[in-house]
Amino acid sequence: HELEGIDGVEVVKILNPVAPFSFLNYVFVHHKMIGTQEFDQILMHEKTHIQQMHSVDLIFVQLLAAFFWFNPLVWQLLKSLKTTHEYIADKKIIKAGYSLVEYQSLLLRQLISNNSSGLVHNFNLSFIKKRITMMKNKKSGWSGKVKVAMAIASTMFLSALIVQCNSNTEEQASLEFEVESNSDFTEGINLPVLPKTGLIANINPDNALYFSISGNKLTINGENYEVEEIGQVIEKSSLSDQGEIVIRIDRNQTMALVRNVQWELRKADRRKILYLGKTDTGEKVEMAMLLPPTPGKPTYDGKYLPHIDDQYIAETGVDILYIKLGDNAGVTNQKTVYDFVQNHMRKQSDNYVVSAKYDDDDTYNDYLVNLTYIQEGFNQIYQERAQQMFGKDFYELDKPDYHAVRKGIPRAISIAVGK
């Protein structure tokens, strides 16, 4: 990407629309943002991170987490450190004389770009409400500083004590979680039988919520909840931006409740979901899905998903493959999707959509099995291209190679309720 030195820092001009962020002496921004009124505030914010060497802080704490990953205080320290860094940068902006209201509005506008990384300082981290509240707070006096110092000293002492005294307990707990996650992951739920895929998700148990649905009842981390309470549970949890939503659903559960749970997760903007199934030999199968945003809200890249109706089809000429998720087509769907997409590849066209529909009275088994095979139709193409281009399996690719394999072949799947 093109570099430009601005006000003592190296500005990297990104071609794709992303949320601004900084790392070491570099500020990464979308090239169209440079020169706008917002850019001055963004640059000052990120320059504060650079001047105070906040990236070094994050690297140091990440190294601590690599060694003391079993201590939950380390993960809380990392989260608190990033929060403090943002408070410092926000304070610098306000002190420079920028309008508080305009700056808060800028934060809210940037919030829609939710592609943050754990090792950089994103301009739009999701704790916006806390940051806006902190901007209005008055500075603490000496008594407040003394309390903070004592709290930090106590935390460091207790952390060292926990590491020294409870290492065996933590190791045993970690082992128990591993056994539960891999051997007894069904927990009495009759999961759908799925084809084995190459996806293996690395789930941090301290940064995940576990949903179970069976017999029209919902549990989250083992406790019963109503569907309407999902947003409150997520808000009160310690789930970070990168936290996982892992869902286990009984194969005989009808889709009406599942759809309502998905809707609440969409409203809470927790759209990255990991569904669990099993193979016919009892091995775990993990199926990742990105739920669409609620109507009227943009996707992570700031775009709005189209409503695929007769008018849209007439205007765009999009080619649609219709699949009924309630049917027991199974592996046939994989070949159907594979042939459909391959045909468009030969025509060098990406103007296609696989339209998957289900009814509320369809079973979750039919829904997930057919949806998995639809995704496997795309994965088969990606796997073949990954081997041709890089000699690797698709799921082993790093991010640039992953995008190179998928270039021009979008996983365009539309899921809707209705016949």
Image (tube, rainbow, N blue to C red):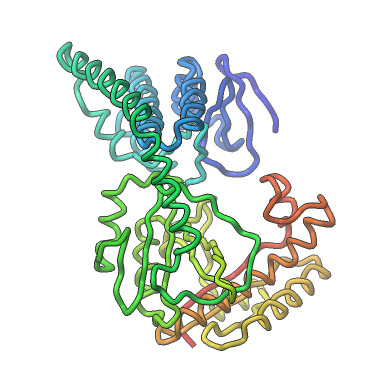
Where is residue 2 drawn, in percent x and y?
70, 30
Q: Nearer the viewer, residue 243 or 184?
A: 184
Residue occupying image coordinates x 74% and y 51%: 404
Residue 332 position by quadrant:
bottom right
When the figure is inspected, residue 110 is found, relative to residue 209, above or below; the finding is above
Where is residue 248 drawn, in percent x and y?
42, 68
Q: Residue furthest left?
A: 143
Q: Nearer the viewer, residue 377 or 49?
A: 377
Where is residue 10 drawn, in percent x and y?
61, 21
Residue 23 position by quadrant:
top right
Q: Is residue 97 left or right of residue 225?
A: right
Q: Is residue 100 left or right of residue 275?
A: left
Q: How many marks?
A: 0
Q: Quadrant of the N terminus?
A: top right
Where is residue 139 drawn, in percent x and y?
21, 18
Residue occupying image coordinates x 66% and y 45%: 399
Q: Nearer the viewer, residue 265 or 246?
A: 246
Q: Is residue 283 left or right of residue 212?
A: right
Instruction: Please say whether residue 335 is visible from this viewpoint.
Output: yes
Residue occupying image coordinates x 53% and y 55%: 303
When the figure is inspected, residue 300 is found, relative to residue 220, above or below; the finding is above
Instruction: Please say whether residue 315 is visible from this viewpoint.
Output: no
When the figure is inspected, residue 226 is found, relative to residue 27, above or below; the finding is below
